[in-house]
Image: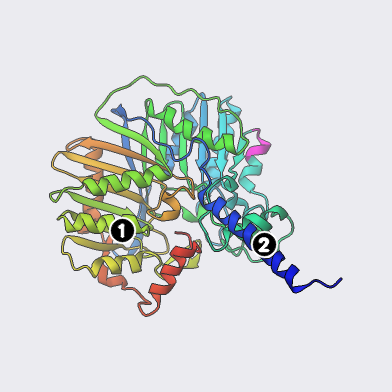
Amino acid sequence: MYITRSKWKWAVAILLFITLAATIYGLFKPVPAGTSYKGEVHYTDDLRFLLNRSSEQDGDRVFNEEIYSAVLEAVEEAESFVAVEMFLLNDKTDGDFPPLSLTLTEALIDASKRGVNVYVLTDPINTSYFSHESTMINMLDDAGVQTIMTDITRLQDSNPLYSGIWRAYLQWFGQGGNGWIENVFEPEAPQMTVRSFLKLMNGRANHRKVVITEETGFVMSANFHDESYFYTNTAFQTSGPVLYDLLETVQAVSDFSDGPDLEAEPSVDQTDGEYAVQVLTEGENFNRVQEMLDDAAPEDTVYAALYFLADTEIVDSIEAAAERGTDIRLILDPNESAFGMDVFGMPNRPVAEDLMNLGMSNLQVRWYNTGDEQFHPKMMAVFNDSGLSVIAGSANFTSRNMRDNNLDTNLYAEMDEGSDTFDEIETFFNEMWTNEESDYTLPYEHYLNPHSSWREWIYRFQKISGLSTY
């Protein structure tokens, strides 16, 4: 049958309208209930700063860890419940790394056998977006542990050039089947289907790293992922009423992912203390970072230890604080690689170049002296004349992680000078900045932007299009 040019125009117009409508809906639809969460301010005497750190000492890489041991000890001591919300929980690697994901999985199975209620929420990335099964999830399922795969389709989209096409036409075909594309996360992992790769391009994730028991809770930048074992990461461990808020954020994800109600009752025997703590997720992390920077006084010092720094408004607030006279000290990952892929300095090196070109002596950048691993914290602290305020957790300082596209949990805390945790955080930043104990960091000049002639357009294109991890 002959189709007239007029009918073709109408068909194209309808498709464009559907695509535009799907794009607008995906970018601006309401976030799921219980996300972008701002908890109450609670007080506790129990706030530990935990650190995994890889460093160079006398020409050798040295790794010291506190986070994994503390989490595994808490799981082993749990008597009532364990709730885990973890972005990466897999052993997909082509290197020789400790079996971190298996160790946690086995600890969770042992807890379940003791009669502990165990819940594990994770992200489809561990199945390469349903291209293959997850070894760890299968082990947990076989042991009767309740596992929940986050329904990331419920999250807002981040890619205006692609998300409408995905929502309108591609998502309906599913992702399962026999793949034939090399796995983009790990060449030795099972191959991906084309449909899984197309889902990956839409770029949303449950990026949280939280573990809760009846006695304690952890908010971390660390994944229990074999290939991430030697990354530098930070975490807070705490207890008290704030555990109820952490559980509320986990329950919200279980609810919109068709998961169970968590049978979990924290043991709370303290409602005051020297540390003020607050749970923040998604967009509330952005709001708090902005507040901290906007409130920073000329006599204050802002330290940030970051894997990614890319959000334009946060960068503008850093610049504004420096213009007011605040001492800004940024310690950044050089962004040599991500998920085993060369990322040629994006986004930190072009952002650092823009900031350093301002020529302000009180705005300084140092690079963490990485080997094959990543400098993976997402942490900022404002030191004032009486103490500090600090935010840390899983949220990179990027639009994707702080604007409701990904799920991320951070802990905000305030404390007085002289407290144990104040001293630990102050030591952490001072050691890296001064290199007194080791060659932790390198001067800004060590990693100059390797592509200044063309980096501007590709960086801006990635930011506008959403075709990046930031």
User: Dividing the image into 4 quarters, which one contains the C terminus?
Assistant: bottom left
Q: How many marks?
A: 2
Pick whichever, 146 or 288, lies toward us.
Answer: 288
x, y (%) of residue 33? 52, 36
| Residue appearing at x 66%, y 59% in the figure | 190
Q: Which residues are magenta?
A: 140-144
Between tags 1 and 2, which lies in front?
A: 2
Percent coordinates x, y for residue 353 in the rendering: 29, 69
Left or right, 268 with reference to 115: left
Percent position of residue 34, x then y: 49, 35
Farthest residue, direction bottom: 453
| Label 1 Cα neighbours within 10 Å, binned few <14 / some 14-19 / many ≥20 | many
What kind of residue is marked 1?
A: Val
**Dividing the picture into quarters, in which one does residue 278 lie?**
top left
Residue 240 location, x and y as percent? 37, 26
Q: Can residue 189 be seen by looking at this rendering?
A: no
Image: 149 above or below 27: above
The amino acid at mark 2 is Leu
Front one among 187 and 304: 304
The kind of secondary structure element at disc 1 is helix
- Could you tell me what secondary structure mostly forms the magenta stretch? helix
Question: Quarter of the image holding residue 13?
Answer: bottom right
CA separation in Å, label 1 and label 2: 38 Å
Residue 392: say if magenta: no
Mark 1 or mark 2, which has the lower sequence index? Answer: 2
Name, please, the residue furthest toward the top: 269
Q: Quadrant of residue 287?
A: top left
Q: Secondary structure at mark 2?
A: helix
Q: Is 236 on the left-hand or right-hand side of 273? A: right
Name the residue carrying label 1: 315
- Which residue is disc 2 drawn over? 15
